[in-house]
Amino acid sequence: MRKGINRRQFIQGATAAGLGYWVAGGLTARGAVSANEKLSVAIIGTHNRAADNIKEVARVNTANIVALCDVDENLLADTMGRFPKARGFTDFRKMLDVMNKSIDAVVVACPNHTHAVASCAALHLKKHLYCEKPLAHTVFETRTVENLAKKQGVVTQMGTQIHAQSNYRRAVEIVQAGLIGPVHEVHVWCDKTHSADPPMPSEAMPVPTGLNYDNWVGPAEFHPYNSAWLPAKWRRFWPYGDGTLGDMACHFQDLAFWALGLKSPTKIWAEGPTPDPQCCPKALVVHWEYAARGSQPRVTLSWYDGLGARLPKHLMQKWGVDPNWKNGVLFIGDKGALFSDYDKHKLLPEKEFADVQMPRKSIPESIGHHREWIEACRANDPDAALCHFDYSGPLTEAVLLGNVAYRTGPGQKLEWDAANLRVTNIPEANRFLQYEYRKGWKL
């Protein structure tokens, strides 16, 4: 807590203001950022993933955190104590309205279902934008955010932090140097699970003191507050989250997208239990087919998540992948295979690559995922942050199309028209591309 301000005073101050925010220090209006100025950053969200983003932005000496927003006044007050010169808000729309002339960039680190509305609100004001993965909650939202960012000409970055690590860069160089030959298959697995047992709880519980629950629900379908999804368990339910696929695939499939230059799939199909309209599955397998790209052949990318049984044990055994590696990416080429996780990689079979000469380092080391974005913002260079939305938008679209395929019906192969943003062969699948927002919320 900020010295001299307790939780009750915080809540009373916000209520008295009549705007749902509390001012902690003053800022004057500012113009464009000069080469000698620090980037002024507002952050939406304060705990869990947002806390990590706050920590990373705060350690960059060319940025200042000038505004913080959280729908939970208790969490907001806790974080405000570390940033006494910042302003605090419980509604990002009010924050952007009040702070428009005082901020240069926005970090979106709230739950998935509010990523797009928060991102678009910042983009309409031409603020540089960092958004946690996945970029949005639906395919339509993702494309909308991507197009708006391009139109506004701002610097963007999606929160796939592993993209900045050296290991991924070396793995990309190996694939692109052709050491394992043309790649026809990629298998990605994750033993994590975000699932709930149907049906979704309908019991209305008391809303915790200090939580603006209506703002938390945001554009999504309204369900009375229940501790089953808040705090921290919202990823298990379709109205708010995208299951394990939406949580982890942007990290692991990032490597395949980068190494193979993938963009939009042509076909998508899934395997899993009978879909529930509200609850995400315990385990899921999804396949994406990508057309040939220049000299690279058509490739099938497969995803496996869940509780062990869904992992591709047969492929791990065939290629000698340590079964203790419960998360990873396996590229299979004409000349061999490459396995990688976040921290390490190796060519397979190992004995056949014992004397191989590794390609030269062609991808420079990152200065840090957040610093990369901040310095790109200060230079006003949209291409300098490597996970800009032109790259991470198609990655997110593909990931979320896996959920569209699963929810349409396991085994049904969707034919995807990326240019027109629609499934062409199974029209009923298109209803999962977007949903109708509650009144008061828009992109």
Image (cartoon, rainbow, N blue to C red):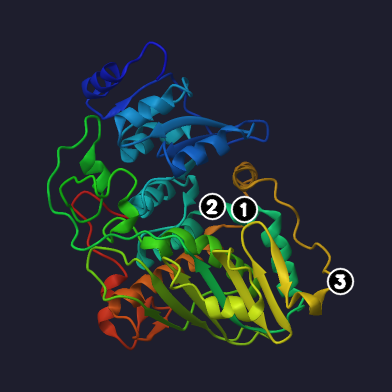
Q: Is residue 375 above or below residue 1?
A: below
Which amino acid does the dot numbered 2 rest on?
Thr
The answer to whether one can see residue 384 in this image is no
Residue of label 3:
357
Which amino acid does the dot numbered 3 rest on?
Gln
Between residue 251 and residue 27, name the one nearer to us: 251
* Disc number placed over residue 385 in the picture, else none: 1
Label 2, label 3: how far apart the Cα atoms are? 36 Å
Label 2, label 1: how far apart the Cα atoms are? 7 Å
CB atoms of marks 2 and 1 within 8 Å: yes
Q: Residue at x 44, y 57 (%)?
A: 135
* Disc number placed over residue 331 in the picture, else none: none
Camera-near label (3 vs 1) is 3
Q: Residue at x 67, y 53 (%)?
A: 165
Disc 2 packing (10 Å; few <14; some 14–19; many ≥20) = many
The answer to whether one can see residue 386 in this image is yes
Residue of label 2:
156
